[in-house]
Image (cartoon, rainbow, N blue to C red):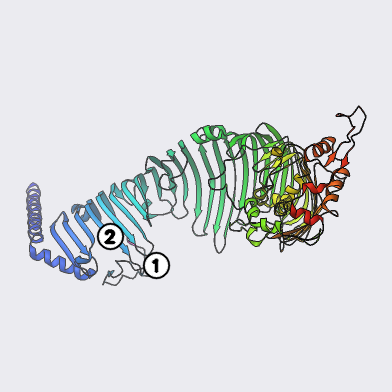
Amino acid sequence: MKKKLKKISKWGFYILGGLLLAAALADTGLRWASSSRRVKNYLVQKVSAALKRDVRLKQVRASVFGVRVSGLEVAEQGGFQQGTFLSVDKAGVRFSLIHLLHGHLKLRTVFLHGGAIRITRGADGKFNFADLSSSSVPSAQKEPHADPFLPRITLGLLDIEQLDVFYIDAAQNRSLAVQQFMLRARRLMFTEPFRVISKAQVRWVEGDFPLESTLAFNARLNLADLDLEKAALDITNLIVRYRSTPAVLTGQIKNFTNPSARLALEISRLSNDTLAELAPDTPEFLIPALRVDVAARAHLADSRAQISRLHLQLPGGELNATAKAAFKERTDYQAEGDFAFNLDELAALSPILASTYGVTGQITGAFQAAADNWNAKLSVQQVGATLPAAGRLDGLSTQITAEGLKTLAVKDLSGTLNGAHFDGYLTAVNRPLYVDARLELNMEKFILPPQAEPAGTEQAALSLAPQEQTALAPAQQAPQTAPAQEQTALAPAQQAPQANTPKVKFPPVHLRAQIKSGPVSVPYFYAKSVDIHTRLTGITAELDKADGTAEMQIGEGEIQDIYKLTQANSVTKAMFLSLSVVSRVINSLNVVDLLSKLMPGDKEQMPEKKTDGKLAFESFSGALKFNKGVMEMTKGSFVSDFMSLKISGTTNFRNGVLDMQVNAAPGKHYDTGIMPITLKIGGTVDEPKGSLSMLGSAAALVTQAVGNNFASNAVKKGVGGFFGLFKKKQDAPAEPFPGQEDTFVPVDPQELLNPAEKNIAEGGSK
């Protein structure tokens, strides 16, 4: 028995030795054969024929343990003169023969060190690999109900280094470059989890805009023997670094059939430097840390997705939300959430918010959104900020609710602006054809800081007086044939220019408003009090469809530029357009010069002969009635120390036609007294025309204006003392006794008139 075993062992040793010798000889033969030029050329011809491209190969090495190639290149279609499509510096595979005896394909190493692939898409939309043949061998057909055969395959090491991938899209003018790509996976198998590590530098160019970042990936992948429902990916970290800002993603994804994920994203040092290329004008800011947590699930078969948790947190605030969506013929989604932000802490993240704007307060709210609607609630609590055009806002508190673009409500509004308290409310309902709005605003005072005049606006076309004065002088000196003869007010060249700004179409607004304020100081306007009531419908920028009424009562103040004020917006247009037109006609007809002859005081204190858009007043009031775009001023009163006006008539905003009457008199006149000068204003808003009528004659004008109006004694004394219109009796004392009334003796007023005015007073022409 022992001899038999000894004999068997001997033969086994011989067989093993023979096998080892055969393997050694085979390995030596493969190494020698693969290194020969003939074998290399044969391989190049076969690969070139299969790919229909020119191919280069520097070296190939083969053995019983693996294959290795170096210097492999595949040309673009048309040859290497058109470029290189694919290049490989070094690549190879090593495997284990012994494991093949057990039906186990064990690849010890698969590596690729250095290489590049260039993919291009031409202007015609074709890719540079479209001509590559896939295979000349027909694909195998599976037998019905046959179970797929999956051999046991393991990979000890997958090692890819220094691989560059370039993509150029000429059709869309964009490109992508993935450079220095590295991928390493150990103990890669289908049945057990394995780790994957990767990194690369990425450059994306869209048009002329480049975007560069670095990526690093570290994860553990479980293929679960290709059971996708059990497959999972544990992301240790996915790091994307853009400029000086890193973003780190961690979490887990399970079930590749209907994936569910729990992910966390942390962004550090997010600043204006991060956005320097995307938005170079972004103000300075720095968010040290920002975190987003997400729990989500997708049902791929049903095209549905759900976010069960979304949490955003950063210094000074947080947001929570949930959502679900279905992607079918029509995308349907629902989302809801809430948020809270401390503006003091948020402002600390940006120097401009903290120092320049001084933002303070809190904002909280909640929202719901769906495919066809959304609604939100916002609570503003003690918010403060320095506004460049308005000054300091403090203690702003309000409750805001909105339902899509249908309704908006701003309730319990209160705060202080530049130390003055205000309160009120605003509601707006978006009807099918108009917006229905309600506004109430009560202000202790409304004072805006002075605004710097933009360069080059000193001679802006809205200030019309200088042009009017020059162009209309000849018309004012023309002889007249009757006291009531009309004079043309404005030539077309002096029409008010219109702002050359694009018109934005908004739906008409139906507005009920009540605005009350103490002292008001805004650009071009100052008043000690303002009280406005409106009940209007169909308000647009042109006011050509407006209906309803409006009343205003403005206390003592001054208009610095009536023309610019009128052009500011629809509200000031309705309030001051009539006064603006009257001012222009007064300029053209030289009414200021005529009234100045009746004014007391030093000549140096007299106003300019042109209003130049600047009007001081003791009160300005008006009652407006709109009817289908036609505004009628039923009661307009402008009272000042120098001049008083009563304005009535219509302005048609549909065609700009004017039909107005203005009564003027020197000094303060309210609802009583005679206004001896009457202006008839016609034409259009752009080209107003006026005529001037007097009470009988210039003499009657002077005597009735001064004698019959309830003017102050100071006015009468000034008129008599400065102009000599009325002289005291010779025996009258220099000063009246207590209770004694002044006595005036009229003198010839012709002494006051220039030749043209004398001609008008005499009712003829010379």
121 is within the stretch colored magenta: no
Q: Tell me the amino acid under the disc marked 2.
A: Arg
In this image, 665 relative to 383: left or right? right
58 on left or right of 742: left
Q: Quadrant of residue 445?
A: top right
Q: Residues within 10 Å of mark 2 (few under 14, many from 20)?
A: some
Disc 2: which residue: 118
User: Which numbered circle lies on residue 312?
Assistant: none
Nearer mark to the viewer, of 1 and 2 = 2
The residue closer to the viewer here, 415 or 723, is 723
Q: Is residue 710 above or below residue 61?
A: above
**Left or right side of 702 for 152:** left
Q: In the image as oriented, which residue stretches furthest toward the top?
A: 738
Q: Which residues are magenta?
A: 147-152
Q: Is residue 148 magenta?
A: yes
Q: Amino acid at mark 1?
A: His
Is residue 437 visible in the rendered image? The answer is: no
Q: Position of residue 624 (x, y in %)?
A: 79, 52
Label 1 to label 2: alpha-carbon separation: 42 Å
Q: Position of residue 191 (x, y in %)?
A: 34, 50
Q: Quadrant of residue 422?
A: top right
In this rendering, the answer to whether 293 lies above or below 628 is above
Q: Which residue is mark 1?
A: 145
Depth check: 697 or 202 in front?
A: 697
383 or 692, which is in the foreground?
Answer: 692
